[in-house]
Amino acid sequence: MLDEALVSDILTLARARGVDFAELYVERSRRRAMRVLNGGVQEATSGIEYGAGLRLFYGTDVVYAYTNDLTAPGLLEVAEDLTRLRGEAGRVDARGRGGLDFRRHAPRGLHAPSVPFDEHPKSYRLERLREADAAARVAPEVRDVECSLLEWDQEVLVCNSEGGWAEDRRVRTRLVVTTIAQRNGDVQTGFAAPGLSVGLELFDCCPPAEVGRKAGEQAMTLLRAKRAPAGAMPVVIGNAFGGVIFHEALGHLLETTSVAKKASVLTDRLGEQVASSVVTYIDDGTTPHGWGSSEIDDEGMATQRTVLIESGVLRSYMVDRWGALVTGYAPTGSGRRQDYTVAPTSRMRNTFIAPGTTPVEALFEGIEFGLYAKDMGGGQVKPGSGEYNFAVREGYVIRRGRVEEPVRGAMLVGKGPESIRRVVAVSSDLKTAPGMCGSLSGAVPVEVGQPHLLVSEIVVGGEAR
């Protein structure tokens, strides 16, 4: 995307002004969005973003600037201004003078789409959204259906003063269906939203009619659900998006963004038993076509599969360049950012609990009274301690080992590090689900996931009397 000589001039200028490390990130993104409400088109937009960000390290001190002026004068001006900000505190390093010998990391197309970004017209997309709309109307009570298709095609180039030159192309597609069902003044919502690092072949593995039907059936289930019970009880958490609890209340505590600042209760605990021995927790940026996958991270390092917790023992953190400088841990290809307007920080990619060996049915056996949290919604987490409260989007009462009536309004309340210690059994049916994770470097696509698992006790906040 940029001429090698220009990149070399920018990074060399920075080195000559005394930086320890300089990194140039260039991005060109195309995005499309189409939204249909009750069959009528509400939005059909597309756009292109093109810009660059320059990050300079002085030891562990970091300065960052970005621009959408990618001409040679524009980029050199950013480099001049950014180094000037450091003033006399910057150190002159004579070794920085001269050109750079770039070592190229060429993209291999590991997550390349089979359907090109411009393959189909808008009418094709609209037909698929209307298929989802029609299938979501599983009963007359389903009054409103909103279907959205989100597509983006992102090209990135990351170069640095160590001679790193890495390129990547990331194509992602997501279908989102929301339904609203009403009966006698009661209103309930259903939701389904698959997404992968693929093109429109997403429709082959996630047919729009199936996605729509799932959202419609969930709203109808909630419409007949009773109020959820309250109190401490055993909870079976469903697979796929059930993993959002541990993403928020455990995963973020393992990013060096918080570990390096000693703002996490899991700081300096490598080698310690921090979870139940049946839990192995993994963050994998290499999952083929995973929603959070990429060939390189946003610092130009190849992504990897990082075992964070193995049989309950803390084995690794998620480490970006800055985190590595501060903590001394090796980088794990976890530096991520929303776009060129923000600097990267350590972030999760596709994070999940590994499959166990317990049959799913066995998780429910022996539970006299508990909750089956089949599908999770959103929640809140207190950074540092991992205290959380999460809404159960679709839940059922467990009574004498059987899954019985649906309930609604349940909240799960606890602390991530404590809850992960109370996992007593993990099944083998691992599934993952996509989401957007917001943190210091913006919103990035991630997968959360787990098999069905049993937590011996969680506080359930319900409304039943």
Image (cartoon, grey):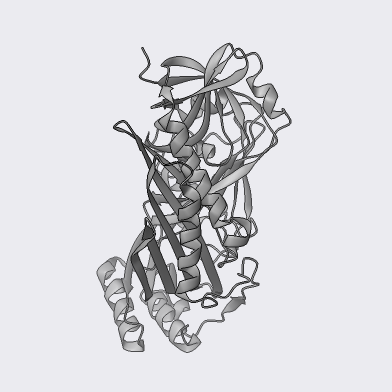
**Where, quadrant-wise, is the C terminus in this rendering?**
top left
Quarter assignment of residue 48 = bottom left
Give the image location of residue 434, x and y in percent: 51, 50
Specify the quadrant of the image occupied by residue 391. Answer: top left
Image spot of residue 97 (x, y percent): 45, 82
Please give the name of the residue rendered at 38% of the width and 16% of the height, measured from the top-left corner.
Answer: 464
Total numbered labels placed on residues in the image: 0
Q: Is residue 291 above or below residue 363?
A: below
Depth order, front residue of 262/318: 318
Q: Is residue 402 left or right of residue 188?
A: right
Does residue 385 appear anywhere in the picture? no
Q: Residue at x 63, y 57 (%)?
A: 205
* Apparent side of residue 408 relative to residue 283 in the rendered image (left or right): left
Which of 317/390 is in front?
Answer: 390
Residue 138 versus residue 458 in the image, above or below: below
Task: Identify the residue at image location x=66%, y=39%.
Answer: 354
Whether residue 199 appears in this view of the structure is yes
Which residue is at the front of the view, 25 or 124? 124
Above or below, comparing residue 44 to residue 327 in the picture: below
Vertical position of residue 73 compared to residue 431: above or below: below
Q: Position of residue 233 (x, y in %)?
A: 50, 16
Residue 182, how many percent across, how many down?
35, 37
Q: Residue at x 31, y 30 (%)?
A: 184
